[in-house]
Amino acid sequence: MGMFEKRRFRNFLIYMNDYEASDPSTHKGYNLKTMTSRELYTAYGLDPYTQEFIGHTMALFTDEGYLGRPALELIEALQLYSISLQSYGSSPYIYPLYGLGGLPESFSRMAAIHGGTFMLNRSVDEILYDEDGVAWGIRGGDEVAKATMFIGDPSYFPKAKTRAVGKVVRSICICTSLPPNLGEAMSAQIIIPGPQAGKTSDIYVMCLSKDQEVCAGNVVVCIVSTKVDNLSSADPLAELGPGLALLGQIQERFDSVQDIFEPVEDGLEDRCFISKSYDESSHFKSAAEDVLDMYERVTGTPLDMSIDPKIPQPGDY
C-alpha cells in the first residue's frame, strides 16, 4: 500500500472497530443493511487490491459474491477477525496441538461421559430404512446398530442423498523449512485471493511445524489447496501453482483431487443429517458454519452464540 492508501485503509478499520449496530452514532450515516460491501469500499476510496485483502484474508470470504451483499455481513466478519486477533496474540487463528485429531478425541471423551456408546473398527456398509424411507439402523458386516437419527458426512450415505458441487485439489507437502519472509513465526496461513492468481477461487497455504506437534523437528508440513475452477482441465494440480511457488524445498508431496458434496435434503423426514464435504479453505470457517446449520437441523433451534466475546467465559485461556 502507498501512503495515501494506508490512510484510507486505517480510516476504514477505525469505522469497522467503532461500528455498533445498536448505536446509530457509529454508523456515519451508512445503512449497512441496504448498502453493499462494494459501495462501502467505494465510500472509503479503497483500491481493488486492498478490497481483496480485506474481503479474502481478513473477512475470509471465499469469492467475490459478498461484494453485492449488505455490508453489515462484511463488518461483522471483520469484527470477529479483530476480536480473535486481540484474544490470541499475534494471530487470529488457533490450531489444536497434535493436529485436528484432537477434536474428535475430545468429542469422544465428552460423549463417553454423557453415556455414549462406541463401536470401534466397524465399517458402515448400509443405512437401513423402513417402508416410509425413514432411517432406523446401520449395518456393519453382520451387526446392526439402531438409532432415531444418523449424523455423518456424505461418504456414509447413499449417493442419492447428496449431490456433487465441485472438486477440491490439494497437495500435502513435507518441506525442509517454512516459506520465506515469515519472520520468527513457526506456523502460517497464507491466503492468495483468487483474482490475484487469475482464478475465481482463493488458494490456501497452511504451514505447520513441531510447535503444533504434527511433525518432527527437522521438517514442516505445508498444505496447499483450492477449488478447481476449470472442471474440464486435464491438469487440475496446475491451479495450485501460485501456492506451491511460495514453499521451500519439497521432500515429499501427496496430491489429491476430490469431489465435494452437500446434502439434497435437510434430514428432517428421513432422519439422516448429512454434513457438507470439507471444502478447500484451511481456516474452517465454512466447516463451523456447517456445524451450526446441522445443530439447528438436528435440534430444531439455533445454537445460541450471542455471548459477548469481550467478557471472559468459563474455559477461556
Image: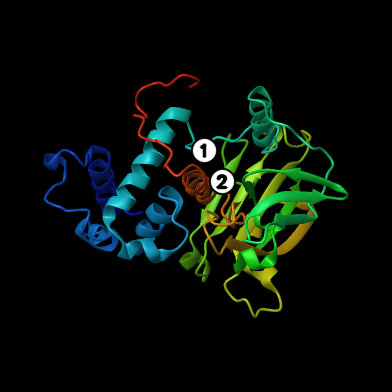
Q: Amino acid at mark 1?
A: Tyr
User: For residue 189, which numbered disc appears in the image?
Assistant: 2
User: For residue 238, which numbered disc appears in the image?
Assistant: none
For the residue labelled by badge 2, is the local secondary structure a helix, a strand or a loop? Answer: strand
Please report contact status of discs 1 and 2: CB closer than 8 Å, yes or no.
Answer: yes
Q: Quadrant of residue 70?
A: bottom left
Q: Is residue 135 above or below residue 176?
A: below
Residue for point 76% across, 53% down: 250
Q: Quadrant of the N terminus?
A: bottom left
For the residue labelled by badge 1, is the local secondary structure a helix, a strand or a loop? Answer: loop
Residue for point 42% across, 42% down: 301
Q: Quadrant of residue 81?
A: top left
Q: Quadrant of residue 312?
A: top left
Give the left or right position of residue 117, taking residue 23 as reference: right
Q: Is residue 134 above or below residue 16?
A: below
Give the left or right position of residue 51, taking residue 98 as reference: left
Q: Tell me, what colour scheme is on the image?
A: rainbow
* Residue with the most extreme right position: 142
Residue closest to the eye, 46 or 269: 269
Q: x, y (%) of residue 80?
A: 38, 40
Residue 241 in sight in this render = no
Residue closest to the eye, 169 or 143: 143
Give the left or right position of residue 234, taking residue 308 as reference: right
User: For residue 93, which numbered disc appears in the image?
Assistant: 1
Give the CA distance from mark 1 to mark 2: 9 Å
Q: x, y (%) of residue 164?
A: 61, 68
Does label 1 or label 2 sit earlier along the sequence?
1
Comparing labels 1 and 2, the label whose residue is closer to the camera: 1
